[in-house]
């Protein structure tokens, strides 16, 4: 009896402690951080080394390979694609006797790209389209014709782009093309502009005016600056963040949306500083009344441990993030995305969907894959490793953050948890709500969400060793039919991601 009483007293003390330590977090349905959320998604390129018989590796991206990607994306429900390409990979087939570009929009390479656009159009996905840089500049000089275009402000290139867009949007009907990138990361010393803001800004003005002249501005607008905001190029007159500021000051009439990149640091995200830093950048865009998004989001590859892993992989190049194989990458990417939404960003595209898309310098060396993906579609063909085609862990959290934060929803303000490493974001659309939480710490927490929902909700849990998936590797809810009319109490394990939603598909 004495032993039994001791157990009861211990249980009462434990319950009292748990109740005392319960953290209450308010989800304010009346206060909105951002409206008309575009949504989250991925960077998806059209496999320039493997998409046609003429490609470096031949036609390795068969219908079966494409279908594998489509099936996985059907679950993910991405709302945003960033699709960058290169004129001389697709439609720029040569030059005439006057050195004017010869364009062909019916090449096998264009038809391969259209597989992505067909999918986006059919699924109402916003596409951020564009080209890596001025054709035949920098890494493309090995193809010759390096003197055919002067830069981003060359009218011959601008007119080629607009002709291509007119074909894709008007003739082919790809109204999913909403925004256009002129030069990838133009503030970088690796870009064809090498940080020359004057060259890039002149090109933006020319492109905007040319789109208007063709009546295409009703469908598509320029996205800018596409800068890596935490990189400062010594060749540029502006810092990375300064490119956003100057775009707002000098080019706001010429851009339809603001868009940036970050390959961030783990410490910045885990400390919560990622939100603070990028919130300051977002203010430049928000002051104009326009939205801002991440066109590329990932983690820096520069750490010594990562570089050693890349060197040990016979198929990876130095431009790889080997943590994509680790469970932890799903936590850190979710954390960064949650902070971006709370900082007012209207969407983010993860770099990247698939290892098979790019090689270092895009030279086509099979042993220099850019390992950044959620899988490698050509794991069998390139690496003799069918398992490399399997879904990697971080697909779990990223796919849920795409699937359950739909286009048109409102991102809601939530109270600060006051707990190191514990963060959340929430969105509402009609009478549905989604709440995503990340606990990027070594300590579990008991919390209470102060929110009232009339619909039952389901819960997904991503924690090391406890990731519930179906036979396809797609996330499965761990609990369903949860009533939340009087709030929700839940445990958030250490190093975990939790998603609660009333949305059904």
Image (tube, grey):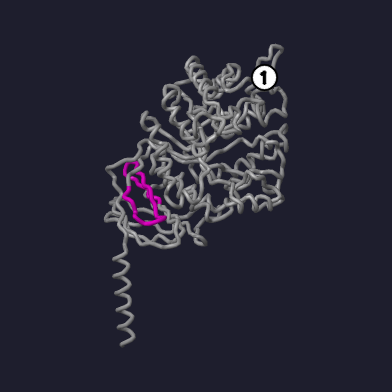
Residue 64 seen? no
Label 1's element?
loop
Please provide percent x and percent y for residue 49: 68, 36
Residue 70 higher or lower than 221, as above or below: below
Q: Is residue 295 left or right of residue 30?
A: right
Please provide percent x and percent y for residue 427: 36, 44
Residue 382 higher or lower than 165, as above or below: below
Locate residue 19: give its quadrant: bottom left
Toward the viewer: 496 or 175? 496
Residue 219 higher or lower than 446, as above or below: above
Residue under label 1: 148
Pick the quarter of the image with the N terminus: bottom left
Toward the viewer: 343 or 471? 343
Please provide percent x and percent y for residue 48: 66, 34
Locate residue 24: give its quadrant: bottom left
Q: Residues within 10 Å of mark 1 (few under 14, many from 20)?
A: some
Q: Which residues are magenta?
A: 414-436
Residue extending farthest bottom:
1
Toward the viewer: 318 or 290? 318
Residue 302 seen? yes
Magenta stretch containing residue 430, yes or no?
yes
The main secondary structure of the magenta stretch is: strand
Looking at the image, which residue is at 66% across and 18% down?
102
Residue 151 higher or lower than 13, as above or below: above
Q: Is residue 53 left or right of residue 344?
A: right
Please provide percent x and percent y for residue 415: 31, 50
Looking at the image, which residue is at 43% across and 54% down?
438
Q: Is residue 50 left or right of residue 248?
A: right
Residue extending farthest top:
98
Magenta stretch containing residue 183, yes or no?
no
């Amino acid at each position: 009896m004495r032993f039994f009483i001791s157990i009861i007293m211990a249980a009462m003390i434990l319950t009292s402690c748990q109740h005392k330590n319960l953290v209450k977090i308010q989800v304010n349905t009346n206060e909105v951080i951002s409206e008309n959320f575009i949504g989250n998604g991925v960077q998806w390129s059209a496999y320039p080394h493997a998409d046609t018989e003429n490609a470096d590796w031949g036609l390795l991206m068969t219908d079966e390979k494409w279908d594998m990607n489509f099936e996985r994306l059907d679950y993910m429900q991405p709302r945003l694609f960033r699709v960058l390409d290169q004129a001389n990979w697709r439609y720029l087939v040569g030059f005439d006797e006057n050195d004017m570009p010869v364009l062909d929009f019916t090449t096998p390479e264009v038809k391969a790209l259209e597989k992505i656009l067909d999918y986006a159009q059919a699924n109402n996905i916003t596409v951020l389209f564009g080209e890596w840089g001025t054709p035949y500049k920098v890494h493309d000089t090995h193809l010759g014709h390096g003197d055919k275009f002067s830069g981003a402000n060359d009218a011959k290139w601008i007119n080629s782009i607009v002709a291509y867009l007119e074909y894709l949007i008007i003739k082919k009907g790809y109204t999913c093309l909403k925004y256009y990138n002129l030069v990838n990361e133009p503030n970088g010393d690796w870009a064809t502009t090498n940080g020359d803001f004057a060259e890039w800004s002149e090109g933006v003005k020319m492109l905007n005016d040319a789109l208007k002249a063709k009546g295409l501005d009703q469908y598509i607008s320029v996205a800018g600056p596409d800068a890596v905001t935490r990189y400062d190029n010594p060749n540029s007159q502006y810092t990375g963040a300064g490119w956003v500021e100057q775009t707002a000051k000098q080019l706001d009439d010429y851009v339809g949306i603001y868009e940036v990149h970050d390959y961030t640091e783990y410490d910045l995200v885990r400390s919560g500083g990622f939100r603070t830093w990028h919130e300051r950048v977002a203010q430049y865009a928000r002051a104009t009344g326009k939205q801002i998004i991440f066109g590329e989001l990932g983690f820096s590859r520069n750490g010594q441990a990562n570089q050693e892993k890349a060197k040990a992989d016979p198929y990876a190049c130095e431009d790889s993030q080997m943590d994509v194989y680790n469970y932890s990458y799903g936590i850190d990417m979710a954390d960064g995305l949650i902070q971006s939404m709370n900082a007012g960003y209207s969407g983010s595209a993860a770099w990247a969907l698939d290892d098979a898309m790019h090689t270092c310098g895009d030279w086509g060396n099979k042993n220099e894959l850019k390992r950044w993906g959620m899988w490698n579609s050509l794991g069998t063909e390139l690496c003799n490793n069918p398992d490399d085609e399997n879904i990697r862990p971080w697909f779990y959290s990223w796919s849920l953050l795409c699937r359950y934060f739909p286009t048109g929803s409102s991102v809601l303000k939530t109270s600060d948890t006051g707990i190191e490493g514990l963060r959340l974001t929430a969105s509402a659309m009609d009478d549905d709500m989604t709440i995503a939480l990340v606990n990027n710490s070594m300590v579990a927490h008991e919390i209470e969400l102060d929110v009232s929902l009339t619909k039952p909700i389901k819960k997904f849990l991503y924690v090391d060793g406890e990731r519930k998936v179906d036979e396809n590797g797609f996330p499965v809810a761990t609990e369903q039919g949860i009533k939340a009319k009087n709030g929700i109490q839940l445990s958030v394990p250490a190093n975990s991601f939790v998603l609660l939603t009333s949305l059904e598909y």
